Amino acid sequence: MADLAALDAAVAECRACPRLVAWREEVAATKRAAFRDETYWGRPVPGFGATDARLLIVGLAPAAHGANRTGRMFTGDRSGDVLYAALHAVGLASQPTSVAIGDGLELFGTRITAPVRCAPPENKPTPAERDRCRPWLARELALLRDTVRAVVVLGGFGWQALLPVLATPDPAGGHPGWIVPKPRPAFGHAARVTLAAASSEAAPLELFGSYHVSQQNTFTGRLTPAMLEDVLADAALAAGLEPASPRRPSG
C-alpha cells in the first residue's frame, strides 16, 4: 500500500481470521438492543487520525458494540469516552466525544490504531490472530516513518504486540526498525523508553505505556483521567507537538 488511505481500504476488506470474521459478523447481525435500529460496520477497523501523525496511540482491538458498530477506533463506547476526553483535555482532539463517523471529530498530529483490527470474543484475540494481523500494523508504522516520533501503548497486550514490529525492519523498505533493548522493556503505566533507530538516517522513537482505558481500569480507579492525560501530554511533548495543560478542579 502506497499510502494510509490505501492501507485503510485494504484493512477493511481483510478476512484472514475465520473466528474473528464469524464473531464480528454475528455481532453486527444480532446487535445490542440499544442499537437495534443501527447498521453495524461489522468489518475490520482501520486506523484513525492524522496522516502525518507525530504521535501514534496503540490500543488492543475494536469493541464489539463500539468500533465494530461505528467503524472508527474507540468510537461509540465508554473506553472511547475516556480516551477522547483526555485527548481533548491536552489539545490533541477537536472535541471530547467520539460518537460516529462524520461527527466532526479531528485529531491533531495524532493517529489511533490497534494490533488486532477485528472485534474478538470476550475482547481476547489469540496469539495467532495477533500475529496474523501484525503486517497491517507494521505497514502503518512504515507509512508514518517520516513523521512519527512517539507512541503511547494502551495496555500490556498492545505493548507486547508492538515491540516485535518496532524491532523488525519493514521488508517493503519502510521503517528501518528500532533497537529494542534485551530483555525487552517491561510494560507499566507511565513507562517510558527511548528506542534508537537501527539506521543513522532515521529518528529515535519515544515509547510510552499507559493502562488501557477499559472499564475494568477506569471504573476501579486504576486509571484516572489525570493519569491518562499526563501520559498523553508527555508523549505529545516528546513527539514535538504542543500539548495543552488540562484544566483540573483545584483541591
Image: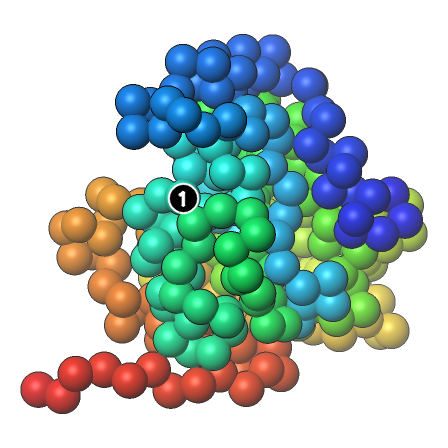
Q: Which residue carries the number 1 mark?
A: 76
The image position of residue 133, as x and y in percent, is 65, 31
Question: Which secondary structure, mark 1?
Answer: loop
Image side of residue 173 versus residue 77, left or right: right
The image position of residue 21, as x and y in percent, is 58, 16
Do we see residue 183 in this rendering?
Answer: no
| Residue 102 or residue 16, whichever sits in front | 102
Quadrant that contains the C terminus: bottom left
**Quarter of the image where one finds residue 172:** top right
* On screen, residue 202 above or below 172: below
Residue plotted at (47% across, 78% down): 91
The image position of residue 93, as x and y in percent, is 50, 69
Q: Of all residues shown, which one is farthest toward the left?
A: 251
The image position of residue 28, as x and y in percent, is 48, 20
Residue plotted at (87% across, 43% down): 1
**Quarter of the image where one finds residue 250:** bottom left
* On screen, residue 167 above or below 246: above
| Residue 190 or residue 90, whichever sits in front | 90
Residue plotted at (66% across, 26% down): 132
Q: Residues within 10 Å of mark 1 (few under 14, many from 20)?
A: many
Q: Kindly identify the amino acid type of the residue bearing the numbered disc 1.
A: Gly
* On screen, residue 89 above or below 152: below
Image side of residue 163 versus residue 168, left or right: left
Image side of residue 150 versus residue 148, left or right: left
Q: How many labels were placed on the picture?
A: 1
Residue plotted at (73% across, 42% down): 8
- What kind of colouring is applied to the model shown? rainbow
